Image: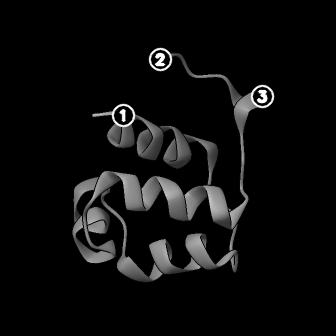
Amino acid sequence: MELNAKNHNTDPKYIRKLVADIGLSQRQLANVIGTSDRTIRHWVSGKIPIPYSCQFVLEYLAKK
């Protein structure tokens, strides 16, 4: 897996799938990646776009 900002996908459906694939609650995931569960909620709702670096971390965790 390699960082490539061309793969940035802020679509809330995609982010929700990643979060579901990780298998943690939003609060647990927030603790793992060092953000708030509110931020996670905003990403999955599309209220704020997810930064690419965070998307990459979610993709990595989802593949584990």
In the rendered image, the residue lying farthest to the right is 6
Q: Amino acid at mark 3?
A: Lys
Using the image, determine if residue 39 lies above or below residue 1.
below
Q: Is residue 50 left or right of residue 1?
A: right
> Residue 35: image x %, image y %?
36, 66
Q: On the image, which quarter does residue 63 sit in?
A: top left
> Residue 39: image x %, image y %?
48, 75
Q: Secondary structure at mark 3?
A: helix
> Mark 1 sits on what residue?
63
> Residue 49: image x %, image y %?
70, 64
Q: Nearer the viewer, mark 1 or mark 2?
A: 1
Residue at (32, 52) in percent of width and height = 22
- Compute the Cα span from label 1 to label 2: 10 Å
Q: Nearer the viewer, residue 43 or 24?
A: 24
Q: Earlier in the sequence, mark 1 or mark 3?
A: 3
Using the image, determine if residue 59 lies above or below residue 25.
above
Is the residue under label 2 in contact with that under label 1 (CB below 8 Å)? Answer: yes
> Residue 50: image x %, image y %?
62, 58
